[in-house]
């Protein structure tokens, strides 16, 4: 388990560098991922899906709106709800960030000798497949792994 934790922390550190390079807090990533998955989602729904505190999601959203990366809009059927949407600027910036992340991780992967690189890729494919069929961590079968906006201890 220390190996998986170490790999996770190393990859997350690379993602953090890229995120901060673009002036975003790391907490913005799960928020943006949820909005990309469902344009018009609410702060409450993002909080529920990510496990982040509603106040943290709200503060993150306000910062992203101030940077011109998100827009808020009213719900047509319930004026009490505010819907969230990505902007063209956000989509462009996220594309740049993905390319930089991929470049960094690709460089790290390229530093692994050929035969060992194939073994690493095979192992990652096997782990991805096992994770895809495992029960949902939120379903009560164990603690949820640390991640952005979660306890890192």
Image (tube, rainbow, N blue to C red):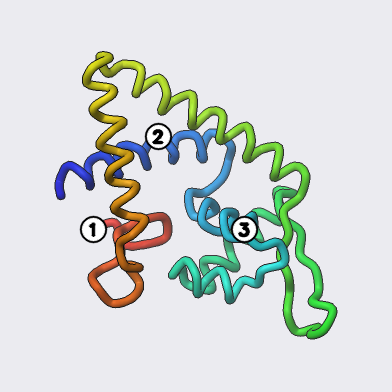
Label 3 to label 1: alpha-carbon separation: 29 Å
How many dots with numbers? 3
In the image, is 6 to the left or to the right of 100?
A: left
Say whether disc 2 or disc 3 marks the residue closer to the N-terminus: 2
**Against 126, is 44 above or below?**
below
Identified at 33% across, 59% down, the residue is 133
Say whether disc 3 or disc 1 marks the residue closer to the N-terminus: 3
In the image, is 66 to the left or to the right of 113?
A: right
Label 2 to label 3: alpha-carbon separation: 23 Å
Identified at 66% across, 61% down, the residue is 62
Disc assigned to residue 14: 2
Residue corresponding to mark 3: 37
Identified at 52% across, 49% down, the residue is 25
Identified at 47% across, 66% down, the residue is 50
Per the image, label 3 sits on a secondary structure element best described as helix
Residues packed near mark 3 inside 10 Å, few (<14), some (14 to 19) or many (20 plus): few
Residue 51 point in image, percent of width and height:
43, 70
Identify the image quadrant of residue 82. Answer: bottom right
- For the residues bearing labels 2 and 1, Cβ distance under 8 angstroms: no
Comparing marks 2 and 3, which lies closer to the viewer?
3
In the image, is 86 to the left or to the right of 110?
A: right
């Amino acid at each position: 388990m220390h190996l998986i934790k170490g790999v996770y922390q190393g990859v997350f550190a690379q993602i953090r560098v890229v995120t901060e390079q673009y002036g975003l807090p790391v907490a913005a990533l799960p928020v943006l991922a949820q909005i990309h998955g469902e344009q018009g989602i609410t702060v409450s729904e993002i909080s529920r899906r990510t496990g982040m505190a509603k106040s943290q999601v709200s503060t993150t959203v306000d910062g992203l709106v101030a940077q011109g990366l998100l827009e808020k809009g009213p719900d047509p059927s319930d004026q009490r709800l505010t819907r969230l949407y990505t902007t063209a600027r956000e989509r462009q910036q996220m594309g740049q960030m993905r390319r930089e992340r991929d470049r960094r991780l690709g460089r790290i992967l390229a530093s692994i000798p050929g035969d060992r690189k194939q073994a690493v890729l095979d192992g990652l494919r096997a782990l991805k497949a096992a994770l895809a069929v495992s029960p949902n961590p939120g379903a009560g079968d164990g603690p949820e792994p640390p991640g952005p906006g979660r306890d890192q201890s």
